[in-house]
Image: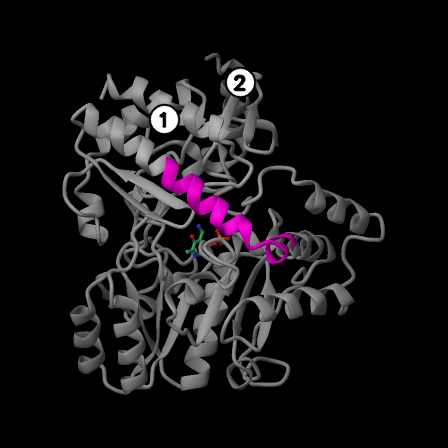
Amino acid sequence: MIYKRSSDLFAAAKKVIPGGVNSPVRAFNAVGGEPLFIREAKGAYLYDEDGNRYIDYINSWGPLILGHAYEPVVNAVVEKAKKGTSFGTPTEIETQIAELAVSMVPNIDKIRFVNSGTEACMSAVRLARGFKNREKIIKFSGCYHGHSDSFLIQAGSGAVTFGSPNSPGVTQGTAKDTLLANYNDLESVENLLNANKGEIACIILEPIAGNMGCIPPKKGFLEGLRELCNEHEVLLIFDEVMTGFRLAKGGAQELTGVDADIVCFGKVIGGGLPVGAFAARHEIMDYLAPTGPVYQAGTLSGNPLAMAAGLAMLTELNRSAEIYSSLHDKTVYLHKGIEKVLSGNNIPHTINRKGSMISVHFSDEPVVDFASAARANNDTFKVFFHGMLENGIYIAPSAFETWFLTDALTYEDLDATIAAVEKVSKSL
Ligand code: PMP
């Protein structure tokens, strides 16, 4: 493929934007080479500035569960924009999307909208700390909750890729209140709770991890966390920025049957516009300003265009139960296809999948936590990534990311993807 125009645009971008990108993982540092500049997208396909077409497994890192330029979402945004783009006042549509979200997700009575997943998680933790009047939190190595200070401690996603899971600029004062446990390891959590009795406000985690590649919880892990939280009177926060409205209408809570105290959203809830949200039962949410003492605010929070996109998206997802079974079936099909090819070519691998999240770890051991994810062969991943790209398949440019399927994918697209894996396998 020819990437000339992308390359020229990247050179121009680097002069005025740090690294040429507004979010680090886009820059391809983890895999080498230069990023594609995308001109437009429709359904399951991306078109770059050189006119190359790709089957897209990133989908804007998760939001576009029904495909790019999905008409009901686009139409809702266009119609809304004609009436003004922001008022900084309450609008009816905020209540409409809030009612719908609360009706779809278990255990939440009220929801507050923000502009990103980062804001959602940051605000949720502040609320938990204020509500419990405790300062410490527990997070898991390899889980990513956005780039706010408390979370850049052994974070996943781009933070690992760039060799800065603990970012400079985060003060020691902040870092000391974030305690680290190992994913899928209840004992590590119990030890922290016992050593810090009465001091932990909340445990935050991705109920199905997606930022160290996809790592589902082991049987009993989430249930065990719920029990520990009850026992120690600690709030359990599910960061469902990736999983919310993606794995089921009610997200991971519905899928696993485990109840969270606070739930964070992003990605799908905004239909591709900048939206995040956090939600909980009345007594917790009413602890927020203006009813309660914990402050949280936003000039563009609940923005009409963003709410229109989100409402259109959630309405579509709420209308049809088949979307989730269709996505599940497609992901299983892809899983089986890739599995067969990699096994047939004797390439050590572990494929993890939950719902429409899937990732290929080039490792011959189970990948259950950050340490095992980090032991996978990154050199193989790099060759795999570039081979797939050259064959028109766009997967995330890092092994510490998940692929997100969209329902716009056809079985022909999946077959083309499996055929590309077959071709690329020969060079691994
Ligand atoms: N939490 C999780 C689980 C995420 O995957 C992400 C982003 N990938 C975030 C939080 C942060 O969201 P945002 O990039 O919208 O700030």
The answer to whether 96 appears left or right of 341 in the picture is right
Give the structural element (helix, strand or loop) at label 1.
helix
In this picture, is 267 found above or below 108? Answer: above
What is the span of residues highlighted in magenta in the rendered image?
Answer: 316-333
Kindly identify the amino acid type of the residue bearing the numbered disc 1. Answer: Ile
Q: Decide which of tag 2 and tag 1 comes sooner along the chain.
A: 2
In this picture, is 346 found above or below 69? Answer: above
Q: Position of residue 141 (x, y in %)?
A: 26, 58
Q: Residues within 10 Å of mark 2 (few under 14, many from 20)?
A: some
At x 19%, y 76%, the residue is 190
At x 58%, y 43%, the residue is 66
Q: Which image quadrant is residue 269 in?
A: bottom right
Give the structural element (helix, strand or loop) at label 2.
loop
The answer to whether 110 appears left or right of 121 in the picture is right
Q: Residues under labels 2 and 1: Cα distance?
A: 19 Å
Q: Residues within 10 Å of mark 1 (few under 14, many from 20)?
A: many
Residue that mark 2 sits on = 52
At x 37%, y 41%, the residue is 332
The answer to whether 391 appears left or right of 30 in the picture is right
Secondary structure that dominates the magenta span: helix
Q: Position of residue 17 (x, y in %)?
A: 52, 35
The picture quadrant for ligand 1 comes to bottom left
Residue that mark 1 sits on = 418
Disc number for residue 141:
none
Kindly identify the amino acid type of the residue bearing the numbered disc 2. Answer: Asn
The answer to whether 247 appears left or right of 258 in the picture is right
Instruction: Pick whichever, 245 or 60, lies toward us.
Output: 245
